[in-house]
Image (spheres, rainbow, N blue to C red):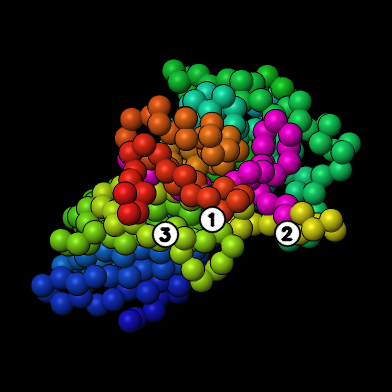
Amino acid sequence: MPKLVTLALLLLVAVSPAHGEWVRVSGTAMTTEIDMEYWAADPEAAEQAGEAVLELFRQIDRQMTRYQDDSELSRLNRRAAREPVKVSDSLFQVLQRAVEVSELSQGAFDISFGSVGYFYDFREKRQPTGEELAAGLPSVNYRSIVLDPDARTVRFLDEGIRLDLGGIAKGYAVDRGIAILESFGIRNARLSAGGDMRLLGDRRGKPWIVGIRDPRSENRNALVMPLADVAVSTSGDYERFFTDESGERIHHILSPATGKPARGVQSVTVLGSDTLTTDGLSTAVFVLGAAEGLALINSLPGVDAVIIDEKRQVHYSEGLMPPGD
């Protein structure tokens, strides 16, 4: 396969004959691996499609990251407590859906968790002190995010609020990436970014086989599912974590109520129609736990979930049938 290096992204594109062939494209953006596979009849269009999707991920990363001072999100965090800030259509759409998921989950998902999340450093194995938690927790409240759809502005009611879109921005990027592939005439595709995936159609007459990783093994799946034309998002306590001095696993999925890693669940996989929604819901269900999380999922039409709890027991929503039943 030819290799094209573009802004430190490695693009692998299979050259397709005229009758069409599966094309595989991979790269890195938004601090995660981007991987896609799609059926294309035109080799030139196939290459352009892959490059366009990767460029989209780079653009959304520059816009919605909290790690760059000049990103749109960082500018919003600095200004919105002083005045309403007009934002782009894309950022406003993500913020709207984030607030909707917060309302559905009664705050189990809350993008203002950045007010305490900024104290965590998983590379340096650092977590906030009691004093830092006490200072940041009062500002974790999605109700303090005021959105004006007509003016497309955002205002914070609390000067301590810091938004973090790590639990939903990749889902938005995956949805947009699928739309780009469709614009190139592609009708069968798989696009994944970390724990978020969209399946466009099937695998040309066969289902896509999607594995849910065993949360305590890098090389083994807990189960596999035949799927088509669906969004899939997984949140797990194995994605970013360290073990503290007492032997406790400190992971990145924080409870907005405590500012500490949520307990009781190892992995949550949510299936639905779009990854913008499933991305946020997988985090919300992880925080809620198996019982409350399944109650939420079962109340939502067209949404299902698989939960692996801390005792390694697997729970299924009502729309899924456990293997062997």
Disc number for residue 242? 2
Amino acid bearing label 2:
Phe
**Residue 315 x, y percent position in the rendering:** 47, 44
Cα distance, mark 1 to mark 3? 27 Å
Cα distance, mark 3 to mark 2? 25 Å
Disc 3 versus disc 2: nearer the observer:
3
| Label 1 residue SS | loop
Q: Of residues 150 and 25, which is closer to you in this image?
A: 25
Amino acid bearing label 1:
Met
Outermost left residue: 19
**Few, some or many residues within 10 Å of mark 3 (<14, 14–19, 20+):** few
| Label 2 residue SS | strand
Is residue 59 among the parts visible in the rendering? no
Disc 1 versus disc 2: nearer the observer:
2
**Residue 118 x, y percent position in the rendering:** 73, 44
Disc number for residue 116? none
Span colored in magenta: 249-273
Question: Does the magenta portion include 254?
Answer: yes
Question: Does the magenta portion include 263?
Answer: yes
Of callouts 1 and 3, which one flags the residue occurring earlier in the amino acid sequence? 1
Residue located 32% across and 70% down the image:
24
Q: Which residue position is annotated with label 1?
A: 30
Disc 1 versus disc 3: nearer the observer:
3
Q: Which residue position is annotated with label 3?
A: 223
**Is 279 above or below relative to 52?**
above
**Residue 136 x, y percent position in the rendering:** 78, 33
**Residue 58 x, y percent position in the rendering:** 48, 56
Q: Quadrant of the N terminus?
A: bottom left
Query: Is 46 situated left or right of 235 in this image?
Result: left
**Few, some or many residues within 10 Å of mark 1 (<14, 14–19, 20+):** many
Residue located 40% across and 71% down the image:
11
